Image (tube, coloured by chain):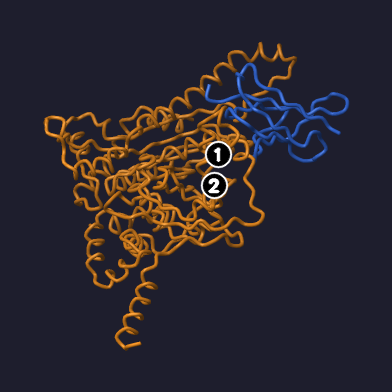
Chain colours: A blue, B orange
Amino acid sequence: MPFEYLIVELFDRDGRELSRRVKIDDDFLGQSDKHFFEIERGTHFVSLGPPYNFTPEERKIRLMDTTPTNPRMVRFDVV
Amino acid sequence: MSCERVSLLRLFALVAVAGCATLNDPLQTPGREHRFPEEASGKNTHSLFVCLTFSGGGTRAAALSYGVLEKLRDTEIVWKDETKTLLDEVDCISSVSGGSFTSAYYGLFGDRLFTHFRSEFLDKNVELALFWRLLNPVNWFRLASPYFSRIDLAAEYYDKHVFDHGTFAALAERPFVIINATNLANGERFSFTQEQFDFLASDLGSYPVSRAVAASSAFPFLLSPITLKNHPNAPDFKLSREYEGALEDYDLNRRRYYWAKNRAMYATDKEALPWIHLMDGGLADNIGLRPVESAYRRGFIRTAMGKDPGIEKLVILVVNARTQGEDKISGRRKSPGIFFVANATATVAMGNYSNESIQVMRDLAEAREQVQGILTDCEGELGECSGGRWRELASGELAPSVIDVSFEAISDPERRKYFLELPTSFKLSEEQVAKLIAVGPELLDASTDFTDLVAALRAP
């Protein structure tokens, strides 16, 4: 596959999933609870849009060996 | 000091000053920058995303791409309940060499292309005009300077007689025009965008479009390179996250690694690269498709796919004016002479791998359709397995379409031979130009990829 696949999740303190814009490297590429992402194999920086009330601030990932039906999961939590 | 010596010194000083080519300015206070615009405007929408690529090939390429633009202007479509032309929806044009004259002219002057470009460029004997400039004794003094050469004479001509002194700040936001040259030092593509110029700490807005087109069409040996200065980085310069990550990908994704390295090196290796010498874009990529492929993998097309609403239909139209001259050496045992070898060395590489590049883009489009198909087929099961956490792919059901226009698709063998044997030059006859302008629309009408696209865009 020319691309890899990624799901980004944000949960509040009660474990409920929240909706937030997802930033991969320098651009917002979709919504956390709505989309999963098709991006190039390699090293990427994943974060979320405002409000900046989540942890960690950013995740650096090496994205590889995924498929559309078996994407990488990246999690953020509200502080 | 004698009077004669003083006069000579004055004369040399005058020559040194007169024979200096325009250089690129350092970064200014941000004004309108030549970057892909975030929002669509006017009749253009993001949801129908159309990118054109115009190949090299002198006036032959300029005329073929001009004819294609006429066809797109005359092709009516209905998109999102609005009637418009396919040309209204063109978001970007990536061009090389001869094709850059058409793209740059359209970017600067819009529909004036269709009333003036033919008389101002296509029907002109540009080679003769440049030759007369070379014969002008005033220019001999300028050419004596090490900082002024044949390409600068050509750029001056284009600036005055074709592009009306236009700079990149005057280019329309859409279509976003990408003019491509080749860095002579490493053979890598160099695109005239502000993103590329950021690495040179330079302002593209003030740079004459004519000089970029001259660089893009600086045919080896006949013309000399265009030189750019690599200015010192601003104190707050930082590589973006995309480049930061990509530069760690040598083992993981070599393609992404070298894409980042070959662009960021201008910023990270200033001492080794104080000057950049650019020549014909065809040396790196003669169909201008690589910037579009890059934009799809990781650039402005990928970003547009992530918007809401994203891209619903992606169209990439490759206009390839490649020819196939008569093979004059394979029928003889005797090896070709040094001049033939020199010419072949300069030109054979251009057009190499063009078909491979087009196939790579088609493979990317098919891979996307495959993934979308898998997800649609498995949607029910995936939703259950993931406890309802399943999502849709960003930019959902993207319908990609790669269309290519080339002389090889002409069915009549004699007509095909006629076009495949047209010379690469900047002096074609009016008859040759007229035939080239006419064949682009014919090739599109004969392309099932194009007719299917138009039918889909006209469907109620």
Label 2, residues with CA under 10 Å away: few <14, some 14-19, many ≥20: many
Vertical position of residue B456 compared to residue B62: above or below: above
Q: Position of residue B139 (x, y in %)?
A: 28, 69
In terms of depth relative to the viewer, which is nearer, B394 or B258?
B258
In terms of depth relative to the viewer, which is nearer, B380 or B454?
B380
- Left or right: B313 in relation to B123: right
Q: CA distance from mark 2 to mark 1?
A: 10 Å
Amino acid found under the numbered disc labelled 1: Gly
The residue pinned by badge 1 equals: B299
In terms of depth relative to the viewer, which is nearer, B329 or A37?
B329
- Left or right: B164 in relation to B399: left
**Residue drawn at x 24%, y 40% as measured from the top left:** B344
**Residue drawn at x 40%, y 41% as measured from the top left:** B288
The residue pinned by badge 2 equals: B36
Residue contact between numbered discs 2 and 1, judged by CB atoms under 8 Å? yes
Q: Position of residue B26 (x, y in %)?
A: 54, 61
Viewer-nearest of labels 2 and 1? 1
Q: Chain of mark 1?
A: B
Vertical position of residue B183 compared to residue B31: above or below: above
User: Residue placed farthest to the right in the image?
Assistant: A14
Vertical position of residue B103 compared to residue B325: above or below: below
User: Residue placed farthest to the front in the image?
Assistant: B1
Residue B364 image label: none
Task: Point out the tag, 2 or 1, that comes first from the N-terminus.
Answer: 2
Q: Position of residue A41 (x, y in %)?
A: 58, 27
**Residue drawn at x 18%, y 38% as measured from the top left:** B418
Q: Chain of mark 2?
A: B
Kind of element beneath mark 1: loop
In terms of depth relative to the viewer, which is nearer, A38 or B74?
A38
Residue A6: which quarter of the image?
Answer: top right
Kind of element beneath mark 2: loop
Amino acid found under the numbered disc labelled 2: Phe
